[in-house]
Amino acid sequence: MKRIGWLVVFMIACAAAVTGPATAIEINVAVAANFTEAAKEIATAFEKKTGNKVLLSFGSSAQFYTQITQDAPFQVFLSADQERPEKAVAEGFAVADSRFTYAVGKLVLWSRDPKVVTGADTLKQGAFSKIAIANPAAAPYGAAAVETMKALNVYDALQPKIVQGNNIAQTFQFIDTGNAELGFVALSQVIERSEGSRWLVAGNLYSPIKQDAVLLKKGAGNEAAKAFMNFLKGPEAAAIEAKFGYGTPESN
Amino acid sequence: MLSLGELWPPIRLTLELAAITTTLLLIVGTPIAWWLARSKAVWKEAVAAVVALPLVLPPTVLGFYLLIFLGPDGPGGFLASFWGARTLAFTFEGLVIGSVIYSMPFVVQPIRNAFEAFGDRPLEAAATLRASPWDAFFSIALPLARPGIMTGAVLGFAHTVGEFGVVLMIGGNIPGKTKVLSIAIFDYVETLQWTPAHILSAGMLIFSFCVILTMMLLEKRLRRAGI
Amino acid sequence: MTSDAKIAAQFRGQLGAFALDAAFEIPAKGFTALFGPSGCGKTTLLRCAAGLTRLADGYFSLGNEIWQDGKQFRPPYARAVGYVFQEASLFAHMSVRQNLLYGYRRALANESDQHIKFDDVVDLLGVESLLERSPRRLSGGERQRVAVGRALLSQPKLLLMDEPLAGLDRFSKDDILPYFEKLHAALAVPVLYVSHDLAEVEQLADYIVLLEQGRVVAAGPLRDLQCDPGSPLARQPEAAVSLDGKIEAHDAAYGLTRLAVKGGTLLLPELDDVVGTVKRIRVRASDVSLARDAPTGSSIINSLPARVLSSGPNGRHQVNVLIGLGTDGAGARLLSRVTLKSWERLAIEPGSPVQAQIKGVALTSR
């Protein structure tokens, strides 16, 4: 009897030793498509620092939101806007008080052809057949694009030429394959490419694209998830974001 | 707030796309099916495999290559330049091209089977009765293959109606031009408008059910008539 | 076509494991049978004549029309040929009438005169009641008759038939054969008829081409080959000679019919046909016995004077004897099969006068 008792204690101790106090936890993070490259670098840095594993999924914020309401297994949600994280909290899918702005997106008008984009004039002259934007109802960069065009009073003229990508990544694909001569994408998507022509849209033409992150209910008790959220607020993440052309809430 | 006027365009667009695609596929697919059924070339089955590729390729792969194919870097752009456009993507015509490629195996396969089913003899008999190859094709081969042709048409139509991945990749979501039913439903879901999503989805479900039921009853009837 | 026009064919080539090397020349009129055992290449030869099969080396001409030679090849639809397949192969999606008219319409479009008319063919083959039916609802025999009619109505210059009776049961065969006989009498179009059934051949053929393992071993008028004691035909156990005889009179009291053949008359069981009709009859060699003098008390009712023309051995213990009816031996020829012993005992030889005894029952006419 006593010997069995010692055996059990021994086995538990072994198990504890094997798993260790700093267990490698896996977390699932839903990331808005425009933040793809930045997210990859931040995740790698986080993994190196803490030994936890980060599984990133990229897509449109709208799509993620729908999935989250249907019980998708994400612990953290990095949205492209503020609206969806707000909604997530309001509807009980996310932890209240965990919401914060992790990045401020910059809108850019880009073409793979170096001669096309010169500035706001390019939109006013309208010398192109197709301009790509992300679906404004689903992606904030698309909404910002519409705002910009309206602010410049060119929206009505350009509307027949607009083609919509399902998300910002697809929008970029349309322009990159030349099917649309130019379009509105996130600065982070073109910051590492030198070719083509671009115009960084003036900040006063559209409401700032504040991108909020939120801890989802599924990540509530998850230490690694919380740690990741904190890491996002920290200096290493900020440096990476700046590299990719994102502003931080303070600098904006 | 939700009007028929808003729901109708994607339905109309989808039906148009499916009808035109099916017609084109019958015209283009029948000779291909005929060749596959009768040719003795050694590379025949390789061609059959190429035709059947869309059965296994993910629609996104197909859509991606189509995007390049239809764009200014590909033959699509070249063709479009004849009427001053840069690309065939984002156009109804581009969707037709995509749908034809995507639904081709569903049309070619049943027709090929139908052509193979009656063997060489009826055509040999026709030849001895002074029918030239064209004549024999239209007077003997096509009528005998009719059940297969009908099956192919129904399958091609239904498959195009349900197409999503390819249209998503090359459509550009233009209302009235490329915003077909499946994209419209997807949009409604993404923007959390459940009601129109339900209406359109239920409609598609009923439609697909009717199509398959009709096809099965038709096949049964034709088989009983001994064709 | 002139009456002495010829059909010349030569086909040489490989079809899988089978090698065909056959050549023949036959008159472009009447029924010619391609006869031989299964697998000897008869069907292949027929298909080559139609242009359905193309071998490495081929020549075919009908009269002065060359259908193929080393330089050119006329495809089947350009040859005025009618083909009846072994399994009727009617078009399932058309009625009998539409099947019949299929080739007719197309031949009309090409040529101005149609000598073979729809009503005549329907009459000849007795298919009037079948016209609106679907091929699916016909018996085997009916299907074959329609197939023949269809081929005929395409105004062929040559009719090819590939064992059309092979797939039928005895009743259907007996049913159709009279129609084929009528065809034989009514048609001006030459017929090339493939069969492995000797009785069928003898019933219908004027000319015969014998095939064995892809080669032609003999060709000639049916009578000649039948009457050649040395020919393969004469050595068949069922060897017989075909004769055409004209009905002279009927004897209702005794149920007999008198048939006049060259060199004599024969009595057979009463036939339905009217006086004057020409009938073809078969006389089996084994049913003809020879006697030196006319026997007086015998139940055999047909006993005719004849003369021995030639003879040939049949195996080790039998002899085939060719006799000509009439005292001068110039009449119709018959084969008689006698035992070697009898041959030697009778001490007859070519030129000897004999009495031919033909068993009444042996004169069969279908």
Image: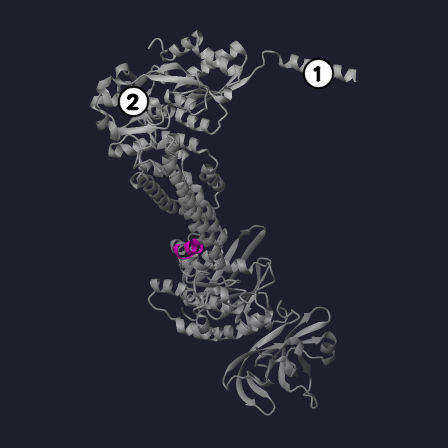
Q: Eyeballing the image, is A70 above or below C30?
A: above
Chain letter of disc 2?
A
Secondary element under disc 2, as helix, strand or loop, is helix
Q: Nearer the viewer, mark 2 or mark 1?
A: 1
Specify the quadrant of the image occupied by residue C344: bottom right
Chain letter of disc 1?
A
Residue with the mark numbered 2: A145
Residue at position x 43%, y 10% from top?
A233
Residue at position x 38%, y 37% from top?
B195
Secondary element under disc 1, as helix, strand or loop, is helix
Q: Residue furthest top?
A: A235
Specify the quadrant of the image occupied by residue B123: bottom left
Residue at position x 69%, y 73% from top?
C319
Instruction: Report the quarter where the N terminus of chain C lies.
Output: bottom left
The magenta region covers: B138-146
Q: Where residue A172 appears, x then y in whole percent?
A: 35, 23
Amino acid type of the residue tagged 2 in the rendering:
Ala
Question: Would residue C27 be counted in the magenta stretch?
Answer: no
Q: Where residue B160 appears, x then y in whole percent?
A: 40, 41
* Prevalent SS, magenta region: helix
Depth check: A58 or C277 in front? A58
Residue with the mark numbered 1: A11
- Is C141 left, or right, of B65 in this rendering? right
Amino acid type of the residue tagged 1 in the rendering:
Met
